[in-house]
Amino acid sequence: MTCPPSIHLSISTGIRGRGVFSTHPIPASTLIETSPILLFSKEEYSEHGKFTLLDHYTFVWPNGRMALALGLGSLFNHSEQPNVSFSLDLPNECIKYTTTRPIEAGEELCIFYGHSLWFELAEGPQASSSQGINRNLFPPLREEADPFQQGDPDEILLPEELPFKLHRLPPEEETVETVQTVEAWAADITEPRYISTTLKWIQRNGFDTPDLEHLKRVNKTDNKISVLLTTSSEERPSNLPEQVGEPYLIQVPESAAVTVPAMNAKNHYWPTVFAPKRKDAAPEWTRGQVKSAWEAMRTVLEASIHSESGELPIAAHVQVDSLFDSGKAFTTKDTRTAQAHPLKHAILDLIREVAGWRASSTSSSSIDGAAPIAENGTNYLLTDQVLFCSHEPCIMCSMALLHSRVKELHFIFPMAKTGGCGGATCLSALPGVNHRFRIYIWDPEWFGYDEQRVRVDDGVDI
């Protein structure tokens, strides 16, 4: 075996056995090794390969196959702070190893085996031996047929048939301080007998719009009678009946009340309709909709399983298909290790990519240099979009989703200590936020793989 001139084989210190070392300084992002592979078919591995010593040197390959790395690929030791990452070159059937930072002369070159190690770490900055390593860390998903492929795509599935559950948010707006309000025009009338005349005037002038249907039109108190005329988006109403006083702006609740405490709080501003059936009503799902969601989540898991060496197995995916005429899919992975950047979370990178695509799309759609007219909500990056990710987003990423006005979030692994969508807290349920999005948590059993292989410590910010 011939080593590249800048690296050599040597005996590692301690109990790590053989290792790969640099002979000269190596810049970051340098390709130092391209290892050819010997592939085992799914059947060869399950029937023979996994029972031999070779199993300790195999890498997971798509379609249930396992790859034995030749060259230096099986000789890199493990480190919790790797200075080399590896990636699978599927078309050329090889594995490429690249430095993640500048390497000093004489420094050992190590990769990251994963977060579920099968051995005790050696003492010192470098961790374990290449003797007996098994890189079967993130096995591929079983090649099972799409469970929602067959059947009528318009059939409504029962809740127990779904591969996910809706995370129900706590009731909102149950105190006066948390009620979301908007401005509206109101006016006072002198006597109850003029109520009917005023309501007819509202109807004749086209002010009986759905915008205020969650509010009662008349507010009777001990000393006056007030009538809700129209929203503040209309000009100040004029030509009112002579029995009606001058119109004035007031704050009224933005939506109906879904609980009794919410109704009491909202009635502090204006009498509000009580609509308990709207409380966290879980939307119905058709078989076709679930099929599309299942495929998107499978895309996320495939990306998570094939994360680069040293990176957290975290991925995110969105199909942006409603903001522009032509949609585009985005899939991103966590790269904070390779980029040495604490903000390179999968979700933040995904939002960044969507922003770049939208900027270029908007620029190309401009006419004569004039900025296109934005429809309501389109200046938010994820309006009406459904985002899929492997793990519950951290608080930082959850706030980014909230500010981007995402419609729905789907994930598999809750993060009890750091999650911002039901784990440590639920940002969209906090008082004062002006947007809520649905949250669905998936059952990993639907994808047929060992979930422990993709889990990360629940104290990690995703």
Image (spheres, rainbow, N blue to C red):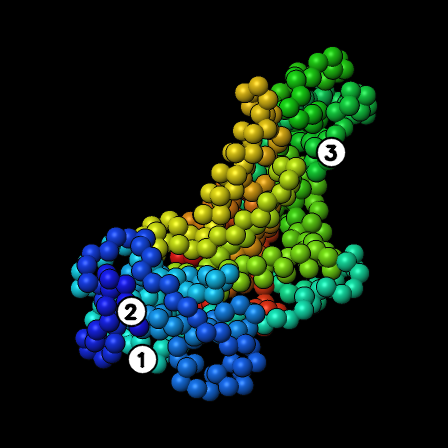
Closer to the camera, 371 or 34? 34
Q: Amino acid at mark 1?
A: Gln
Q: How many marks?
A: 3
Residue 275 percent coordinates (x, y) = 71, 47
Question: Seen in the image, is 151 located left or right of residue 406?
Answer: right
Task: Name the secondary structure under disc 3.
Answer: helix
Residue 289 percent coordinates (x, y) = 70, 55
Q: Residue at x 59, y 22 (%)?
A: 367
Q: Earlier in the sequence, mark 3 or mark 2?
A: 2
* Residue pointed to by mark 3: 210
Closer to the camera, 355 or 444? 355
Question: Seen in the image, is 418 located left or right of residue 202?
Answer: left
From where the camera sits, is residue 433 visible? Answer: no
Q: Earlier in the sequence, mark 2 or mark 1?
A: 2
Task: Name the secondary structure under disc 2.
Answer: loop
- Packing grade of label 3 (10 A; few <14, some 14-19, many >=20) is few
Residue 293 percent coordinates (x, y) = 64, 57
27 relative to 309, above or below = above
Quadrant hosting residue 182 = top right
Q: Amino acid at mark 2?
A: Thr
Real-space CA distance between mark 3 and mark 1, rounded to the nearest whole angstrom: 71 Å
User: Mark 3 near mark 2, Cβ–Cβ under 8 Å?
Assistant: no
Q: Quadrant of the C terminus?
A: bottom left
Residue 239 percent coordinates (x, y) = 74, 12
- Packing grade of label 1 (10 A; few <14, some 14-19, many >=20) is some
Real-space CA distance between mark 2 and mark 1, rounded to the nearest whole angstrom: 20 Å
Real-space CA distance between mark 3 and mark 2, rounded to the nearest whole angstrom: 76 Å
Task: Name the secondary structure under disc 1.
Answer: loop
426 relative to 111, above or below = above
* Residue pointed to by mark 1: 131
